[in-house]
Image (cartoon, rainbow, N blue to C red):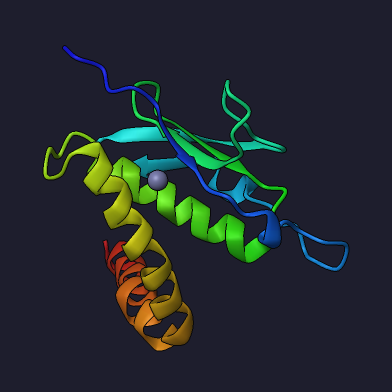
Amino acid sequence: MTKTLPRACCRSVAANAASDGDTLVNISDVSTLDIGCFTYKVRELNDYRDEEGCILMGSTDVANNVISIDTSYNEEVVRETLLHELMHALLNDTHVVDEEVEEKLVRVLSPKLMDTCKRNPALVEFLFHREVHTNDKKRKRS
Ligand SMILES: [Zn+2]
């Protein structure tokens, strides 16, 4: 079996680094994520860089099921980075696109999906919370 190398997403984000007034996000509630048939560990890092010193906001290691997120950026950036890495994990082993195209696809879709969800809270409620409530009712009946 061929293992896919960890996927690193290197983005220049100096302008988005958290400043004194920013709220730093706590991602401990999502320290593990069930993605497809795998459980990924979400690792928080600060000043995350690759071996060459390139700034990394996040990465997805599909060989070891680890998503790494630099949480030293402002909340909005951290949330979008987690969604970005989640999308990489979802696309893992689909063989729909090669890695270069996947990165472009994720970079385009992740911020647009995040923005659409932010601007349409009723959509998010409809897509996710309704199902949760429905499942709760089903559980109570049985
Ligand atoms: Zn990426």
Which quadrant of the picture is home to ligand 1?
Answer: top left
Q: Position of residue 1 (x, y in %)?
A: 16, 12
Residue at position x 40%, y 87% in the image: 122
Above or below residue 18? Residue 131 is: below
Q: Is residue 85 above or below residue 63?
A: below
Q: Position of residue 113 (x, y in %)?
A: 36, 70
Q: Identify the residue at image location x=77%, y=64%.
A: 23
Looking at the rendered structure, the number of numbered marks drawn on it comes to 0
**Picture quarter containing residue 132?**
bottom left
| Residue at 31%, 75% in the rendered image | 127
67 above or below 53? below
Q: On the rendered image, what quadrant is the C terminus found in?
A: bottom left
Question: Would residue 39 be seen by someone viewing this image from the given angle?
Answer: yes
Return the residue found at the far left: 96
- Residue at screen point 62% across, 50% down: 27
In this rendered view, identify the residue nearer to me: 141 or 36. 36
Tell me residue 80's x, y (percent).
50, 60
Position of 32 compared to 70: left or right? left
Visible residue check, residue 74: no
> Toward which corner of the image does residue 128 lie, by quadrant?
bottom left
Residue sitting farthest toward the right: 20
Residue 109: image location, x then y, percent: 32, 64
